[in-house]
């Protein structure tokens, strides 16, 4: 087991990114954007101990997901990207639920936002199942991403669905 594991769900483990993850970042974000995303995640982790993790399933890296401090937005930003070959296994939904539990119990967060791509409905559906709602102030038809929010406080708080099991 990797002693750098800082996140765990039923089937996923997460650890901070390191220089050895260049191939995963290139596969997820392309050779042009991958290196800058990897460096940003590594720097954010070293500065704040809040950054997306490298996610592994059955001992193999399958994605990058976690939180970024939402400078300019209210709350933490939730991000998740998985390799196409693991699509349809329920890993993204499992990750989002466990990440929200982590945000509340470890990071003490009560407001979370995410940007869901508008060219594919799956990420938005996963976020909606977890209680996120589309931000009323954004025009999703004119953007590449849709801003979605989740509030875990107050009388109208949207709470994550209970986990099975």
Image (spheres, rainbow, N blue to C red):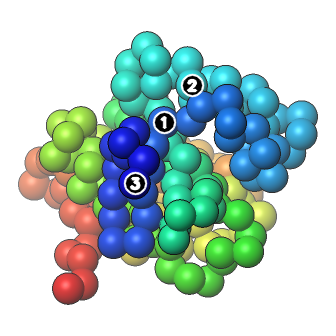
Tell me where residue 118 sits by quadrant: bottom right
Mark 1 to mark 2 CA distance (whole Å): 7 Å
Mark 3 to mark 1 CA distance (whole Å): 14 Å
Give percent across and percent down for residue 48.
Answer: 38, 19
Disc assigned to residue 16: 1
Q: Quadrant of the N terminus?
A: bottom left
Residue, disc 3: 1
Q: Is residue 131 visible?
A: no
* Label 1 Cα neighbours within 10 Å, binned few <14 / some 14-19 / many ≥20: many
User: Which label sits in the foreground, 2 or 3?
Assistant: 3
Mark 3 and mark 1 lie on one chain; the one further toward the N terminus is 3
Residue 57 vs residue 41, the one in the foreground? 57
The relative height of residue 96 versus residue 144 in the rendered view (above or below) is below
Mark 2 to mark 3 CA distance (whole Å): 21 Å
Quick one: which residue is furthest to the left in this view?
155
Residue 75 vs residue 17, the one in the foreground? 17
* Label 3 Cα neighbours within 10 Å, binned few <14 / some 14-19 / many ≥20: few
Identified at 24% across, 77% down, the residue is 163
The relative height of residue 13 versus residue 10 in the rendered view (above or below) is above
Mark 1 and mark 2 lie on one chain; the one further toward the N terminus is 1
The relative height of residue 97 versus residue 137 in the rendered view (above or below) is below
Quick one: which residue is furthest to the front in this view?
1
Give percent across and percent down for residue 123.
Answer: 58, 66
Q: Are marks 1 and 2 in contact (CB under 8 Å)?
A: yes
* Label 2 Cα neighbours within 10 Å, binned few <14 / some 14-19 / many ≥20: many
Q: Is residue 59 visible?
A: yes
Left or right: 65, with 23 as reference point? left
Mark 1 secondary-structure assignment: strand
Give percent across and percent down for residue 139.
Answer: 65, 50
Disc assigned to residue 42: 2
Mark 2 and mark 3 lie on one chain; the one further toward the N terminus is 3
Tell me where residue 117 sits by quadrant: bottom right
């Amino acid at each position: 087991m990797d002693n750098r594991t800082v996140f765990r769900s039923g089937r996923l483990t997460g650890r901070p990114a390191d220089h050895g993850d260049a191939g995963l970042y290139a596969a997820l974000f392309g050779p042009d954007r991958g290196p800058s995303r990897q460096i940003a995640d590594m720097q954010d982790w070293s500065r704040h101990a809040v950054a997306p993790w490298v996610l592994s399933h059955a001992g193999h890296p399958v994605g990058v997901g976690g939180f970024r401090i939402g400078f300019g937005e209210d709350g933490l930003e939730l991000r998740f990207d998985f390799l196409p070959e693991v699509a349809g296994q329920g890993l993204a939904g499992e990750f989002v639920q466990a990440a929200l539990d982590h945000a509340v119990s470890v990071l003490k967060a009560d407001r979370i936002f995410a940007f869901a791509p508008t060219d594919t409905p799956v990420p938005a559906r996963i976020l909606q199942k977890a209680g996120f709602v589309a931000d009323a102030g954004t025009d999703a038809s004119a953007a590449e991403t849709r801003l979605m929010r989740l509030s875990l406080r107050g009388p109208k708080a949207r709470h994550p669905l209970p986990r099975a099991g």
